Image (tube, grey):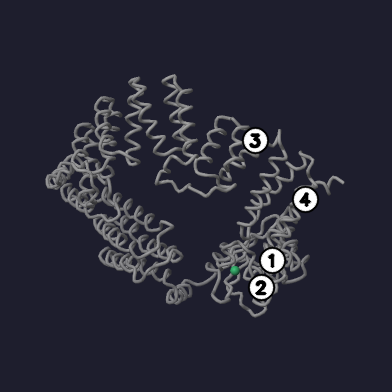
Amino acid sequence: MTKSSAASRILTTDWLIRRAGESYYRRGLDYFQQGKVAEFQDLGDKAEAVVHGTEGYEVYLTLVPDDLEHNCDCPLGMDEEFCKHCVAVALAWIETRKGGSDGERTKANNRAGSTQITNADLQRALEAESKEELVNRIVAWAEDDKQLRENLMQMAARRKGPGVALALARKSLERAIRVRRFLEYREMRNYAASVETAAAMLEDLLKDGQAVGVMELCEMSLRLLAAAIEQVDDSDGYVGGLMEQFGDLHLRACIAAKPDPAVLAAMLFHAEMKSGLNEWHGCIERYAEVLGAEGMVAYRKLAEAAWAKVPVKTQVGHDYDSTHYRITAIMEHLARRSNNVEDLVAVLERDLSRPDQYLRIAEIYRNAGDRDKALAWAERGSAITPGPHGSALRLFVAEEYQHRERHADALRLVWIEFRESPSLISYQRLEQFARAAEDWEEWRGQALAYVRRMIAGDQKKPEKSSLVFSHTWLSGRWGHTLLVEILLYENNIEMAWQEAHHGGCNENLWLRLAKAREQQHPEDAMNVYLRIGNEAVSRATGNYDDAVELLERAASAARFAEKSNHFETELDGLLKKFRLKRNFLKCVEKRRQFLYLSAKSE
Ligand SMILES: [Zn+2]
């Protein structure tokens, strides 16, 4: 289907009324007639505008083959409703396209490339003006346009020489990066854009041979950004992106400036020690080449002096200290560069206040091929870390035992792990270790017996679990869901089905059971889909696609079971029960042919 035929079919009031529903349509029409649509732009197969209702809302519409994709930042629009604002903008669009009769309009479009102004048109228009007129106009425009003014100032400053240009860049960067009040995430795109405009000047300055000045300004910008991030909602990661840009530019400027290695080493070391957001973390890797041998020696000297002051921590206990953390990271980087395992372990050994240090040391030794030291460290860590926090260490030790064919010792640990956190994963792990020991039947029996005891309630539930539900059909008691999951994993479908009926299980497992039973027992499958479909409808708001899809699966299982009449009675019941859920009714209507199967076959 061509775009213009989609447009002529969709951009009509009839289509709009059907799409938005009578009441939204009427309210949208009011808005449109009251002139609340501003800044309307027809962009071919897209349109955008601001609608001034209670607040100003931005609306974007896009023509797609069978629909109008719509996007409005009002509360309803956020729920993907075709809101009154969307209606108002669509009406403005229809009006714009009317400019003449539809037929003439299409012809004119084809002939003259439409009434749209393109970039090429802009270029032609500018070329037609005199230079003097252009200069006057641009200077006048810049009085109202911050971004344009900034660009012109940069041009002018560059002409006046590097001193002026650097001073302007400093001022612009400070102004752009400093935050005066808390910025919401919606405001961050503009914030990042103005920082980027200011930063663009640094690229020019670097080209003009001002590498030292650019380095300093990058360092300043990184400091200011680290401070600014405290006062913005940066969920979209703009600040992180800007920091990366300044970091990258700093390195390039550094390569061009060739600073004194000892001075650069000191700058990098102190920046990393003070960095609030790890923006200089691991800089030794990136700057190794610029530092050269001399710089590396200077850097290492600074690091070792600071390291000598770090207290040795041998007790488990968590007191976080950022200086300690940073100097440790620096020393780790240096040790890794020298490729000496014992150096690296010596760094990590200074802080044994966390169990994961034992694990890291064990992993370092294992990767270096020294498995005896690896095991010894993991065992030490495991011994002082019982309970859930010791899980990773326990598994490490278990793997090392298995590697040495100490199967009984390995299984003892894996069994503790299964009891600590019973799940399909820990069950599968037990299976893997027990099979290696050729003893799975025995362990399987023990594991299933444990789950059944759990169900019977004489096992205490682990404190971490949030999976403890009341005993209902859809959730199942905690252990029951696990039992059904294990039986399904072992392809024991009949037994899984029995257990699900007996003690319940979660929704996901019910759906898997239904799917597994569709062929042999379609009526069972139909009942499961109907019950879960019912839950899904009552839970959903606005979008019923998933719920109705479940009902479609129920319908097809019903046909297979020759129970279509029964299904349709149930479906009619649902429509009655949820008659206030307008979108649900609409969705069922739209999918009628997949739901009312007996009527269709008559
Ligand atoms: Zn809206």
Label at residue 568: 4
Between disc 4 and disc 1, the foreground one is 4
Circle 2 SS class: helix
Does the residue tagged 3 have its C-beta within 8 Å of any atom of ligand 1?
no
Mark 4 is on which residue type?
A: Glu
Disc 3: which residue? 516
Across and down, in percent, residue 69 comes to: 64, 59
Disc 2: which residue? 28
Label at residue 20: 1
Mark 1 is on which residue type?
A: Ala
Q: Residue at x 55, y 37 (%)?
A: 484
Q: Residue at x 61, y 60 (%)?
A: 541
Q: Tell whether 185 sits left or right of 339.
A: right
Across and down, in percent, residue 72 comes to: 58, 66
Q: Residue furthest bottom?
A: 34
How dense is the environment of label 1, judged by Cα within 10 Å: few (below 14), some, or many (20 and up)? some
How dense is the environment of label 3, judged by Cα within 10 Å: few (below 14), some, or many (20 and up)? some
Determine if residue 290 is in view: no
Between disc 3 and disc 1, the foreground one is 3
User: Which of these two is toward me, 478 or 175?
Assistant: 478
Q: CA distance from mark 4 to mark 1?
A: 28 Å
User: Mark 3 or 1 closer to N-term?
Assistant: 1
How dense is the environment of label 2, judged by Cα within 10 Å: few (below 14), some, or many (20 and up)? many
Mark 2 is on which residue type?
A: Gly
How dense is the environment of label 4, judged by Cα within 10 Å: few (below 14), some, or many (20 and up)? some
